Amino acid sequence: MNLPVVIYLSGIFQEKSIYIDLNANKNYTTHMKSDARFLIVMIFVALLFGQVNGLIPTLPPSRTLPPVDKKVVTARVQPVLSGVNVVKKTIPSVVTIKISQQVSNYSLEVDPSNPFSLFRRVLRGTEQTAQNIGSGFVVGAQGLVVTNKHVVTTDPKATYSVITNDGKEYPVKNIYLDPAGNDIALLKIDAKNLKPIQIGDSAGLQLGEPVYAIGTPLGEFTNTVTSGIISGLGRGITAGSVYENYVEKLDNVIQTDAPINPGNSGGPLIDAQGNVIGINTAVSNQGQNIGFAIPISVLRTVLMKYPGVVKAQ
């Protein structure tokens, strides 16, 4: 009885037929040993031939890592700083926005001429008041500051000033608004040798990245630092304040759980490399630790147009 045997060598189908006579005499064992030796020799020769000519496959390409595209990751591959070092690097560039305005003073008095209303409001005069209302950051050493549009458009008769990190106060000479309608304003002050913040890249942000917010929450606590993570990307929201009578729809904003409060508006949202990646602009009043920031890519577009932006009236 003859049994064919098939052998695969180096990925190439080769066939060698060995015929075994089951009814043979004692020469059967000798033939088998001879055939076994023949097979071993043939396998060895085939392996050697395959190795020399590259027929033996190496690890498949899928087992090796693809080369890194440096152009894509350069902006995000930077040393991660500690929170302390992030603050040291960026806080000199953060400013507070102050408003000065005339406020009317009224009092109530009895109105005997009106039987339907016992009291009437009587104007007693006006007084000049000033308070901190927002935050911002330096982008030009010669006095160019970024903040939110809604921070500096609440009162057309008001005047504004910028308080730098070292406590110096500069009146705002010009206010420029983004002609595209984004909640961004550029302020020009007469100052020199300010420290501009380093502008990062918001295009490659990922959920879970650590971030920091610096500003003046509640208009009182200057240089307040909070931290959190990026908790959402590409959000669409309706932002505004009943106190400021300002409502706006914002698209493609960054969501963060870093605590952001009134007064933080216009301040920077900073990544773990100490680069500003967003402009803090809104906070949800229906939840906890839900804040939103305009991606810094929007500001990049605005700065490319400066000083050809629309001047605020």
Image: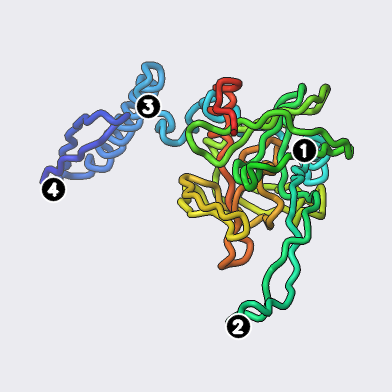
Q: At which x and y percent is residue 87?
A: 80, 42
Q: Nearer the viewer, mark 3 or mark 2?
A: 2
**Label 2: element kind:** loop
Disc 1 to disc 2, C-alpha distance = 47 Å
- Residue at the left extreme, as displayed: 1
Mark 3 touches mark 4? (CB < 8 Å): no
Q: Which residue is mark 4?
A: 23
> Residue 56 has which mark?
3
Is 25 positioned to the left or the right of 229 in the image?
A: left
The image quarter containing residue 32 is top left
- The tag earlier along the polypeptide, 1 or 2, is 2
Q: At which x and y percent is residue 184?
A: 59, 38
**Label 4: element kind:** loop
Q: Residues within 10 Å of mark 4 (few under 14, many from 20)?
A: few
Q: Which residue is mark 1?
A: 161
Q: At which x and y percent is residue 149?
A: 60, 41
Query: Is the residue 114 above or below the residue 158 in the image?
Result: below
Is 60 positioned to the left or the right of 250 in the image?
A: left
Disc 2 to disc 4, C-alpha distance = 134 Å
The image quarter containing residue 259 is bottom right
